[in-house]
Image (spheres, helix red, strand yellow):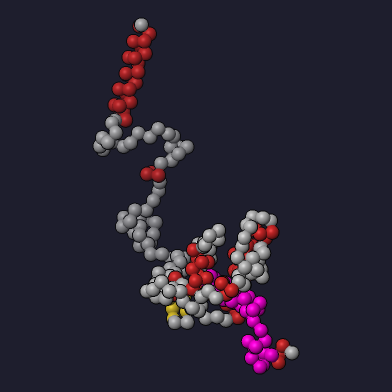
Amino acid sequence: MRIIISILLIGAAVGAAAFGILGFQGKMSRKPPVELYSDRMFPGMDRQPKLRPQEPNHFFANGVSSQLPVAGTIARGEPIQTTDGAVYSFEDSPVNTGHVTGTTNFVELNPLPVTDEFIQHGRERFDIYCAPCHGKLGDGNGITKKIGAMAAVANLHDKRIVQMTDGEIFNTVTHGKGLMGAAGPLMTTPDRWATIAYLRALQLSWLGSTNDLTAEQKAALK
């Protein structure tokens, strides 16, 4: 019996000491918090060396903590040059959304200037992000299908996809669809449009005919 009483008294004393040191939940105090770890093992972030805004600091020549960014070291964001002028990433513009401005309708054509260099860049992006599933020919026979990782992959030469507007394809590439993951977080906006420009060239190489060529091109072909 005495042993039990002793244990209870010891427990009560430990509890009282804990409450005396740590206090009650929600209790306000101006005393510094009790840290139950070694400063050498886990240095507290509240004691890290830092610069407080607007406070004097003799490290810098002008004696203040808040300094302007060094020129050229912080990305500010550059506008994208479209066929209708420069557009920033935050604007409601077809180049950013794939939609006609202020509507839910997809734009028909690529809003960026399509050049040979642009298409070649799109080919590089296509081979990296699209070919593993859709294949380098765009026929849906990529490596993921060959190893059985994906049983069904869209053939990009299907009539349904060929007849899609560029804006709808951009929307699918950006946000993903079905088993297809979103490429928006992986590819820049111009890269996605460049990939679509290359896809159109790839589709034309499959579905086009000599009737689509100019007289000069036909002569060179012969």
Q: Quadrant of residue 191?
A: bottom right
**Residue 204 picture location, percent across and down:** 62, 79
Quarter of the image with the C terminus in it: bottom right
Q: Is residue 132 above or below residue 80?
A: above
- Identified at 52% across, 81% down, the residue is 113
Q: Is residue 86 above or below residue 175?
A: below
What is the residue that sits farthest to the top in this orientation?
1
Q: Quadrant of residue 42?
A: top left
How many labels sit on residues?
A: 0
* Main secondary-structure element of the magenta-colored stretch: helix
In depth, the one of 196 and 151 nearer the eye is: 151
- Identified at 55% across, 58% down, the residue is 179
Q: Quadrant of residue 36?
A: top left
Please indicate whether residue 21 sits to the left or right of residue 136 in the image.
left
**Residue 49 picture location, percent across and down:** 40, 48
Q: Is residue 122 visible?
A: no
Q: Residue 195 lies in magenta, yes or no?
A: yes
Q: Is residue 41 visible?
A: yes
In depth, the one of 81 and 142 nearer the eye is: 142
What is the residue that sits farthest to the front in this orientation?
159
In depth, the one of 82 and 24 nearer the eye is: 82
What is the residue that sits farthest to the right in this orientation?
222
Residues drawn in magenta: 191-218
- Identified at 67% across, 64% down, the residue is 141
- Identified at 41% across, 71% down, the residue is 104
Please indicate whether residue 68 sits to the left or right of residue 151 in the image.
left
Q: Is residue 21 above or below residue 102?
A: above
**Residue 207 picture location, percent across and down:** 64, 79
Please indicate whether residue 42 sits to the left or right of residue 149 in the image.
left
Q: Residue 143 lies in magenta, yes or no?
A: no
**Residue 125 picture location, percent across and down:** 59, 69
